[in-house]
Image: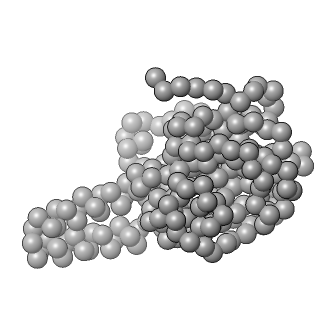
Amino acid sequence: MTKGSLLDNVLVPIAREGWPFIAIFGLVSLILYFVYAPLGWIGLVLTLWCVYFFRNPDRVTPEREGLIVSPADGIVQMIAEVSPPEELDMGSEPVVRVSVFMNVFDCHVNRIPCDGRIGKLVYVPGQFLNASLDKASEENERQMVRIDLDSGAFIGAVQIAGLVARRIVCYLEEDQIVLAGERFGLIRFGSRVDIYLPHGAVSHALIGQKCVSGETVLADLKSDEAARSGEVR
């Protein structure tokens, strides 16, 4: 499968949750234009940014069994070995957690990291600290998802609201069968997604790496390759 034409990649669909915001931005911009034209042009720029923020492009997801793809566009900010959230019932043994931070210019539509079944969904209200802080994974508002694999292993995906984010959207239901790369929700205006890998799995991502949701491979459960190292060049 190949991506479409250049025009298709520019004129991408808009997430349905974004249309009310785009309409409000556009209406306010129009009012500001009649009040004071320069303010209207500023409003137009903000409206175009809102359209860009809620873009919902197609992605080409690798289909091989064992691959774990990024659930979010953004930068790999942290890779740490930690205990999974108790709420997801993944055990207490430490696993590798990969944190992908989304800024306000990244696409905020989140995608399923691997094929499986939704074993558990847990919503936790909380604060709106800067999502780049490590403690945001325990103190911020978040939506937790456990994906059960055919092998019996678990993968956790946690949508975390950020300093500006005030709304987490998740379309999933428990016992739902999902495929890697499928859209499962979004977070509005700057946030983070944590991925908890199965026990014994290592991350093939690198801190500072730019991820593309549904495409960038974070781990390969079929590989015995050690964790990778890298440098800025």
Q: Which residue is drawn at 63% across and 26% down?
A: 229
Residue 63, quarter of picture = top right
209 on left or right of 149: left
- Give 195 or 64, whichever is nearer the viewer: 195
Q: Position of residue 46 (x, y in %)?
A: 28, 61
The foreground one among 157 and 78 is: 78
The vertical placement of 190 against 71, above or below, is below
What residue lies at 16% left-to-right and 62% top-to-bottom? Answer: 41
The mark tally for this picture is: 0
At x 66%, y 38%, the residue is 218
Q: In this view, does 229 lie to the left or right of 225?
A: left
Query: Is residue 62 among the parts visible in the rendering?
Result: no
- The part of the image, by quadrant, that contains residue 217 is top right
User: Where residue 25 sits: x, y (%)?
Assistant: 30, 69
Q: What is the x, y in percent for residue 184?
A: 63, 59
Kindly identify the residue that appears in the image at 22 percent across and 65 percent down: 43
Q: Report the front residue among 78 and 104.
A: 78
Q: In which quarter of the image is the N terminus?
A: top right
Residue at the far right: name it: 152
With respect to residue 68, does 20 lie above or below?
A: below
Is 59 on the left-hand or right-hand side of 39?
A: right
- The vertical placement of 182 against 231, above or below, is below
User: Can you give x and y, in whole percent of width and height, for residue 124 in the image?
Assistant: 67, 72
Q: How is the image coloured?
A: one colour
Q: In which quarter of the image is residue 207?
A: top right
Residue at far top of view: 233
